[in-house]
Amino acid sequence: MNASVLKLGLLAGLVVAAPGGSEVRAPAVARERVADLGRFFAGGAPVEAAFVLRNGRTGEVVRHGPARAAERLLPASTFKVPHTLIALETGVVSDADFVIPFDASRKRDGFWSDDWSRDHTLRSAFQGSVYWYYQETARRIGPKRMAEALKRFGYGNESLAGGVDAFWLEGGLRISADEQVLFLQRMNEGRLGVSGRSLEVLRSIMVLERGPGYTLRGKTGTADVTPTRELAWLVGYVERADETWYFALNLEGEEVWERWGPGAARRQLVSSLLRELGVLPAAGAK
């Protein structure tokens, strides 16, 4: 694929005649297109994938797998993005260094990282995807305030089915890749009705990578779809100079955990996609 063809930018406006014969340039018009990025997901067992990229300035959108991009799926730990704002806005946590002591009785069966078995701060819990920390903050927020925030944010289907401490992990909450990027744009542009301080705390703990002239922020999420099939997300945004691009990746298949389970593997995949689309500089560029 020719990266220059897909590189996002402001569309040239149409030249039209104005009264008196002078020429004016009509406003740029946002566009949408489909990109075949299948080679990035090839190899191993078949995988269903969607990738959505939105230019926050022009509204231009590129999609791989547009039908899947519109499908609502369990958000898993990508919900930690709005969850963090809700916890901060309700005063359940005070800042990025707010500590919740580890309670061994909260340990559950299945996958468990050794790093989870200790006290955590908001920052370490977000970056380490420590599910018990966010379950505890959800219980402290309570279903009424959580439901009110989901509605105000317009987050996916806004469902709390499954309980206030499980609805995003294995309950009824669903959101599509298309909705993820729109939510992230509203959030980053300060259109959710939350304080600037809460947004700054969240932005500080979302940083995944800084490079020459850009900052990449995001959050992973992983869930079991069946005993042998996993769903994996990485959503976020890239800031470069005066432009911001919002993205959402999801992958589903029999070997998703083996291939892209570690957050670093998904980050590398997203970086490759962003370079292909001209958003990040080519590897080795300065």
Image (cartoon, rainbow, N blue to C red):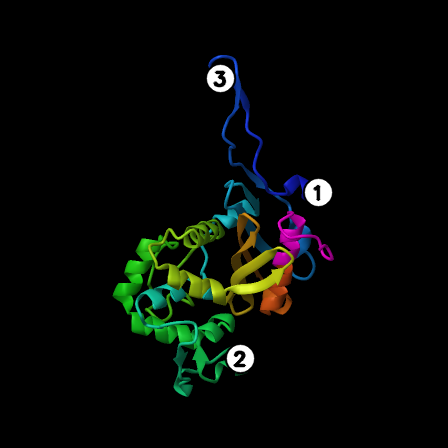
Q: Nearer the viewer, residue 7 or 23?
A: 23
Query: How far across and how far down the image is residue 61, in percent?
Result: 54, 43
Res 255 seen here = no
Q: Which residue is mark 3?
A: 18
- Residue at 47% over, 70% down: 126
Query: How far across and how far down the image is residue 56, in percent?
Result: 50, 46
Q: Secondary structure at mark 1?
A: loop
- Residue 115 shown left or right of residue 197 in the figure: right
Q: Which residue is mark 1?
A: 2
The reply to whether discs 2 and 1 touch (Cβ–Cβ < 8 Å) is no
Q: Amino acid at mark 1?
A: Asn
- Residue at 38% over, 63% down: 198
Q: Quadrant of residue 140?
A: bottom left
Instruction: Bin the neighbour count of mark 2 within 10 Å (Cα to Cα): few under 14, some 14-19, many 20 and up.
Output: few
Span colored in magenta: 270-286
131 is higher (above) or lower (below) than 175: below
- Where is the C terminus found, in terms of image quarters? bottom right
Q: Which residue is mark 2?
A: 113
Q: Amino acid at mark 2?
A: Ser
Q: Nearer the N terminus, badge 2 or badge 1?
A: 1
